[in-house]
């Protein structure tokens, strides 16, 4: 994985993110010179919006989606230089209008009706609330799942490393120690136990001091009926974090029980597993390393 640290070990990724934002602003300033003083074909934004307000709005879109003006606006026809801002040639522009209406409804019709909130504490949403710098706001699990279906586990692990190197610290994706275990649970539930264990290995590599990888591995093994392996994994989780209560409770259940089936009790349910809800593994779990 490409290093993003200087010779002193300082993480350079936040600085790289800031430079990317600066580049986007500079690019937007280039479009500023192209924007006319009067506007046509405004269907959602106020028809009397000022030029500075319009530019600020467009820059907000650019930052929220991590894209430039050309995502929604087409080039002028006939080889003429510049953007044809009034054109509706790109379907992304109509999508943007729909999203603006959706945001207005959420803020005006729904969030405004929330009770018990002081006016100065009221929450509103914007494009960046969901997009987080991504044109298509998939979660990390969704993105990796699509890649897994297309390129297999090796391609998925490779993509995770690339995404982490590019986006870590930006807020675009959740790279916390519970994100991959949650994906692993879903994979095990769908009968892809070998892939689930590979994802947990990746998580353990990224977070060697977190018990969530071994805890989730133990949960998957227990629900596949592999009691001894599950107990071993839970013990590993506790060796990493002796005070980790979910692992303590689950190990106690397995110690008292005669099988790896989940017993009902304080640790049974999604609340006992910080990585997400329970996911039974299929018989394919016997293929894990």
Image (spheres, helix red, strand yellow):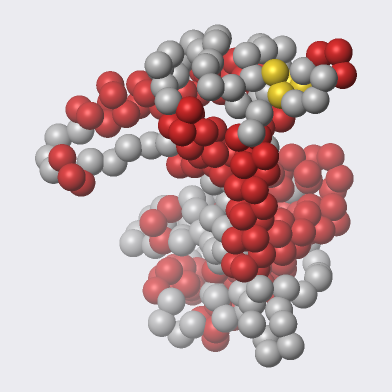
Residue at the bottom extreme? 8
Residue 136 pos. (x, y %): 64, 36
Question: How many marks are shown on the rendered structure?
Answer: 0
Query: As rendered, which of 72 and 220 lies closer to the eye?
Result: 72
Quadrant for residue 289, please give it: bottom right
Quadrant for residue 12, please give it: bottom right
Residue 275 pos. (x, y %): 51, 59
Asked if residue 75 is positioned above or below residue 6 in the image, the reply reads above
Q: Can the viewer see residue 43 in this picture?
A: yes
Quadrant for residue 113, please give it: top left
Q: Can the viewer see residue 186 in this picture?
A: no
Asked if residue 29 is positioned above or below residue 166 in the image, the reply reads above
Asked if residue 230 is positioned above or below residue 277 in the image, the reply reads below
Residue at 37%, 23% in the rendered image: 104
Query: As rendered, which of 134 and 286 lies closer to the eye?
Result: 134
Asked if residue 99 is positioned above or below residue 234 in the image, the reply reads above
Residue 256 pos. (x, y %): 45, 71
Residue at 84%, 48% in the rendered image: 152
Query: As rendered, which of 284 and 70 lies closer to the eye?
Result: 70
Residue at 48%, 28% in the rendered image: 51
Horizontal side of residue 60 vs 78, given as left or right? left
Residue at 81%, 70% in the rendered image: 1
């Amino acid at each position: 994985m490409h290093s993003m640290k200087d010779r002193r070990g300082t993480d350079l990724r936040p600085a790289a993110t800031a430079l990317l934002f600066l580049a986007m602003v500079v690019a937007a300033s280039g479009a500023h010179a192209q924007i006319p003083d009067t506007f046509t074909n405004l269907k959602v934004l106020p028809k009397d919006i000022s030029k500075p307000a319009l530019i600020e709005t467009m820059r907000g879109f650019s930052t929220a989606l991590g894209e430039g003006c050309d995502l929604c606006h087409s080039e002028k026809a006939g080889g003429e230089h510049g953007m044809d801002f009034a054109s509706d040639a790109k379907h992304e522009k109509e999508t943007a209008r729909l999203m603006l209406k959706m945001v207005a409804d959420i803020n005006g019709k729904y969030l405004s009706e929330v009770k018990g909130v002081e006016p100065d504490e009221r929450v509103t949403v914007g494009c960046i609330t969901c997009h987080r710098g991504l044109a298509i706001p998939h979660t990390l699990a969704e993105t990796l799942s699509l890649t897994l279906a297309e390129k297999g586990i090796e391609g998925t692990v490779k993509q995770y490393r690339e995404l982490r190197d590019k986006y870590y610290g930006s807020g675009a994706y959740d790279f916390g120690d519970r994100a991959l275990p949650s994906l692993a649970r879903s994979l095990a539930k769908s009968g892809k136990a070998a892939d689930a264990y590979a994802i947990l290995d990746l998580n353990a590599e990224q977070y060697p001091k977190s018990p969530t990888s071994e805890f989730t591995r133990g949960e998957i093994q227990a629900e596949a009926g592999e009691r001894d392996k599950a107990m071993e994994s839970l013990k590993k989780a506790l060796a990493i974090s002796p005070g980790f209560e979910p692992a303590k409770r689950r190990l106690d259940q397995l110690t008292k029980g005669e099988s790896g089936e989940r017993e009902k009790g304080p640790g049974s349910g999604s609340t006992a597993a910080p990585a997400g809800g329970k996911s039974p593994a299929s018989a394919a779990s016997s293929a894990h390393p």
